[in-house]
Image: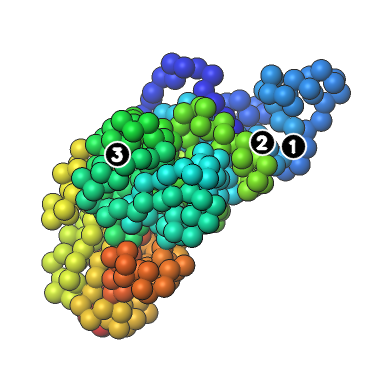
């Protein structure tokens, strides 16, 4: 876990923070880059010093399952980008989410969330948490009044994800965070799709922000990771659970994520530009029945997105006429898109929910979540926009 030592962290632009933040403490022997520290343990000659580090009185590292210098830099960079008091990491995004929920909830606790969370998160809510006596109320994602009513009926933790995966619905963060706090709930926001470049949930009042770092933070589809940042007292609990549970982020993955984060700002800006152009193109195409992108003025929550986001992100989804059969014909024709279960990388990635975000769900469960089988999720890369549009044109023509 890393935490702020300077309560008055000055705030340069996110572009500058993505490059510089969190690194100086671990630059050794005049190196300009953070090392990958492949050491399971850290040795001490002096018992008192060892004891102080082991008991948290002094800063330092003891054992790699708990903390590691490379991992600490990754946590600190994200902590500073999100404007958080503290941050801790985990082996994957799901480890960060499930460790947080297990650390903060007890049998008898009540969670309120929405139907459109990422498939893995949704399964925590429908399968795993109820099995240990935690009550979960999943409400229609864009019915904010219904969410407020559910919160008012009792809520220990309000879990929000916006924009959602894969339907790109947008939640009104200030409104729902206020409702959660009025009930005394902890409010946690999955910021994976937006990234701290486009949305800062903590600045809107949330208590915790969580990421699948595997996605935009790393940005190169070569490392898994997760991170939670926010209120120090809550992050301490999550860290303690994770250090014992053992879903630790590997130092090599932390290095790859850190290296990716140096260009976060550039990538996310370009991906948002490309996504907007692709969404506008698809909206005018006669084979496409629906386009979900918060940057389009036709998006039902466009105004909310414009208020709480500084960019609309690189993710969109669209439905083809002819449903799943059209999707099956369309996918093989795409040249500049991996057909894969990932998102947020420099390459464009496409896939239907049945094989990506909601692979764990049955068709009936997807239908209950309002996810049509003919939907295609499109994670826009940093390629040239003319190539992306030409690629989509020829693939749609072939359907
Ligand atoms: N949150 C969101 C919004 C996601 O899209 C994903 C994965 O796709 C996760 C969490 C889980 O992340 P990971 O695959 O790193 O466990």
- Indicate the quadrant containing the N terminus: top left, top right, bottom left or bottom right: top right
> Which numbered circle lies on residue 212?
none
- Secondary structure at badge 1 equals loop
- Secondary structure at badge 3 equals helix
Mark 1 vs 2: CB contact within 8 A: yes
Image coords of residue 203 (percent x, y): 34, 29
Q: Is tag 3's residue or tag 2's residue first in the polypeptide sequence?
A: 2
Asked where in the image residue 72 lies, by quadrant, the reply is top right
- Which of pointers 3 and 1 indicates the residue nearer the eye? 3
Judging by the rendered image, the residue that carries numbered circle 2 is: 67
Judging by the rendered image, the residue that carries numbered circle 3 is: 152
Identify which residue, 68 or 109, lies in the foreground.
109
Q: Is residue 308 left or right of residue 240?
A: left
Residue sitting at x 39%, y 35%: 185
Image coords of residue 332 (percent x, y): 37, 79
Report the Cα–Cα distance between label 1 and label 2. Answer: 6 Å
- Indicate the quadrant containing the C terminus: top left, top right, bottom left or bottom right: bottom left
Vertical placement of residue 293 versus 22, above or below: below
Residue sitting at x 37%, y 31%: 184
Image coords of residue 208 (percent x, y): 43, 36
Judging by the rendered image, the residue that carries numbered circle 1 is: 63
Vertical placement of residue 71 versus 314, above or below: above
Residue sitting at x 81%, y 30%: 43
Mark 1 surroundings: few (<14), some (14-19) or many (≥20) residues within 10 A = some
Q: Is residue 61 left or right of residue 316?
A: right
């Amino acid at each position: 876990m890393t935490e702020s030592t300077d309560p008055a962290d000055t705030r340069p632009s996110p572009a500058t923070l993505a490059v510089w933040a969190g690194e100086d403490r671990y630059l050794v022997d005049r190196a300009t880059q953070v090392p990958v520290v492949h050491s399971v343990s850290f040795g001490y000659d002096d018992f008192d010093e060892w004891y102080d580090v082991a008991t948290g009185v002094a800063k330092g590292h003891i054992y790699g399952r708990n903390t590691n210098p490379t991992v600490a830099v990754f946590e600190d960079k994200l902590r500073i980008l999100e404007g958080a008091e503290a941050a801790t990491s985990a082996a994957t995004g799901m480890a960060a989410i499930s460790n947080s929920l297990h650390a903060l909830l007890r049998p008898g606790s009540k969670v309120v969330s929405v139907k459109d969370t990422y498939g893995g998160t949704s399964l925590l809510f429908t399968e795993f948490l109820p099995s240990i006596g935690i009550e979960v109320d999943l409400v229609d994602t864009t019915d904010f009044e219904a969410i407020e009513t559910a919160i008012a009926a009792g809520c220990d933790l309000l879990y929000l994800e916006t924009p959602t995966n894969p339907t790109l619905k947008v939640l009104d963060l200030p409104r729902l965070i206020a409702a959660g706090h009025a009930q005394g709930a902890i409010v946690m926001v999955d910021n994976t799709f937006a990234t701290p470049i486009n949305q800062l949930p903590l600045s809107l009042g949330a208590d915790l922000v969580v990421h699948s770092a595997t996605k935009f933070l790393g940005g190169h589809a070569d490392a898994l990771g997760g991170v939670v940042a926010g209120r120090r007292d809550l992050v301490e609990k999550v860290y303690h659970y994770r250090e014992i549970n053992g879903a630790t982020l590997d130092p090599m993955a932390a290095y790859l994520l850190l290296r990716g984060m140096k260009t976060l700002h550039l990538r996310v800006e370009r991906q948002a530009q490309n996504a907007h152009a692709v969404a506008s193109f698809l909206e005018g195409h006669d084979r496409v029945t629906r386009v979900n992108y918060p940057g389009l003025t036709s998006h039902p929550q466009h105004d909310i997105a414009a208020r709480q986001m500084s960019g609309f992100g690189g993710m969109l989804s669209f439905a083809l006429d002819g449903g799943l059969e059209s999707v099956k014909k369309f996918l093989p024709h795409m040249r500049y898109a991996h057909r894969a279960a990932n998102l947020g990388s420099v390459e464009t990635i496409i896939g239907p929910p049945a094989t990506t975000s909601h692979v764990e769900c049955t068709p009936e469960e997807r239908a209950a979540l309002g996810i049509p089988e003919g939907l295609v999720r499109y994670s826009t890369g940093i390629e040239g926009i003319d190539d992306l549009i030409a690629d989509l044109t020829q693939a749609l023509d072939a359907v």
